[in-house]
Amino acid sequence: MVVLLTKRFKCPIAFFYINKINSSLLSMLLSSAIKQFHEIGIRIWSVSSVTCDGASANVQCFKKLGCDFDVNNIDNFRCKFIVEKNLEVNVMFDACHMLKLARNTLTEFPPKCRLMAPVSTSQLIWRLSLTFDHR
């Protein structure tokens, strides 16, 4: 989907009826869409960006395109990639989706290690009863 930052405009560019997509195909589709936008003269601001949630397929896709998200090696941390040797594209993970992923992950731990206890389908209670092992 293409979204303008300066005006109220959204336009889907593709839709695929599939259950899952692997990172290789996703990276190919993403770079192809960016190339085609550039070829027809559509510029996304002065710097292009891609925003998504932090699903593993998305992270692996960006790694295949040249990003490096290793926070332990901050000198090589890179949240942008190059398409067609001259189109720089920045990667942003949507904060709301990232919080949702963190919430879902924390509720999937075994019951003894769970940080949140589901009360109902719409409410969660945060518990900090987990003992963290600091080595």
Image (spheres, helix red, strand yellow):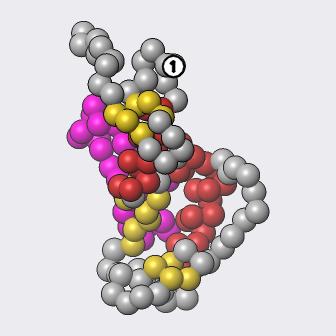
Q: Nearer the viewer, residue 115 or 30?
A: 115
Query: Looking at the image, is 68 positioned above or below residue 13?
Result: above
Looking at the image, residue 27 sits to the left or right of residue 91; the answer is: right
What is the residue that sits farthest to the right in this orientation? Answer: 17
Q: Amino acid at mark 1?
A: Pro
State whether residue 64 appears in this view: no
- Judged from the image, the secondary structure of the residue bearing numbered disc 1 is loop
| Front position in the image: 117 or 78 | 117
Residue ranking furthest to the front: 120
Which quadrant, please, contains the N terminus? bottom right
Please state which of residues 31 and 123 is positioned toward the viewer in this rendering.
Answer: 123
Magenta region: 63-91
Q: Residue 104, position in %: x, y?
A: 48, 39
| Along the line of sight, the residue nearer the viewer: 4 or 91 | 4
Task: Residue 108 in the image: state x and y as whole percent.
Answer: 52, 29
Please say if 112 is above or below 76. above
On-image quarter of the C terminus: top left
Does the magenta segment cover residue 74?
yes
Q: Which residue is mark 1?
A: 110
Residue depicted at x 29% and y 25%: 128
- Residue 5 placement (x, y as % from top left): 36, 81
Residue 96: name its quadrant. bottom left
State the residue at coordinates (55%, 88%): 40
The spot of residue 54 in percent (x, y) is 46, 48
Asked if one can make out residue 70 in the rendered structure from this viewpoint, the answer is yes
Q: Residue at x 38, y 90 (%)?
A: 7
Q: Dot 1: within a 10 Å radius of its alpha carbon, few (fewer than 14), some, or many (20 or more) residues? A: few
Q: How many marks?
A: 1
Q: At x 60% / y 69%, what residue is drawn?
A: 32
